[in-house]
Amino acid sequence: MKKFFVLIVVLLASCSNLEKKEEDKAPVYISSETEDEFASIENQDSPYSKEAQDAARRYQRLREQSWENYIQKQQIAPTKKRIRKSPQQTKPKVSSQAKRLSPEKVKELEIESEQMINYFCMKNRNNRKFSNQDYCKEYANDVLRQCKARNYGHISRSVVRCLKSRLRV
C-alpha cells in the first residue's frame, strides 16, 4: 500500500510542469503618448531637461564643496587617542565601624558566629563529607578565619555576613 502511494506521488511530480507558458502572461500595452514621453526623456528633448541638468550641476557643486569642507576639518582637527589608565590597586581600609564597636557588640557577634557554626554542623551531619563532628567544626572555623582575615582580624557585621554566605546557612 505504501509503495502504491509513493508511486503515485512520483508519477504526479514527474508529470507536473513548473514553467509558465508564454500564453499565460498578459501582454503589456503602452499607449503612444507614453512611448512619445519615453522617447523625449531619452533624447533630452524635454523642456525640463535644461532645468534638471542645471539643478543636477548645482547639487553636484554643493556636494563637492561640502566634501572639501569635510576634508579640511579632518586635516585641521585630528582625533586624539584616549589613553586608558589601569586602576591603581589600593589596599582596603579598615572600616571605622570595626574600631567603634563596643565590647558587648563584639561579644554578640562572636556568639552569633558560633551559633552559625553549630547550626551548619547540625544541618550537615548527614552529609558524608561532614559526618565527623570535629572535621565539620574545623572546616567552619577555617572559613571564619578566612572571613576575619579579609577584615584585618577584626570581627564585625561583615565577618558574620561573610561566614553566613560561605557556609550557606
Image (cartoon, helix red, strand yellow):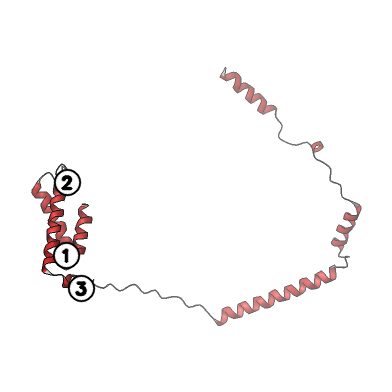
Q: In the image as oriented, which residue stretches furthest toward the bottom? A: 76
Q: In the image as oriented, which residue stretches furthest toward the front? A: 104
Which callout, 2 or 1, points to the residue nearer the camera?
2
* Residue 123: mark: 2
Task: Say what secondary structure mark 3 lies in.
Answer: helix
First reached walking from the N terminus: tag 1 or tag 3: 3
Q: Quick one: label 1, few (<14), some, or many (20+) residues within 10 Å?
A: few
Q: Which residue is mark 3?
A: 96
Q: In the image as oriented, which residue stretches furthest toward the right? A: 32
- Residue 90, quarter of picture: bottom left
Task: Say what secondary structure mark 2 lies in.
Answer: helix
Q: Position of residue 27 (x, y in %)?
A: 84, 43
Q: Which residue is mark 1?
A: 149
First reached walking from the N terminus: tag 3 or tag 2: 3
Please indicate, yes or no, whether residue 94 appears anywhere in the rendered image. Answer: no
Q: Position of residue 147 (x, y in %)?
A: 18, 61
Measured in 3D between alpha carbons, the distance from the residue under mark 2 to the one under mark 1, in whole angstroms, is 26 Å
Please state which amino acid type lies under the numbered disc 2.
Answer: Lys
Residue at image x 85%, y 62%? 41
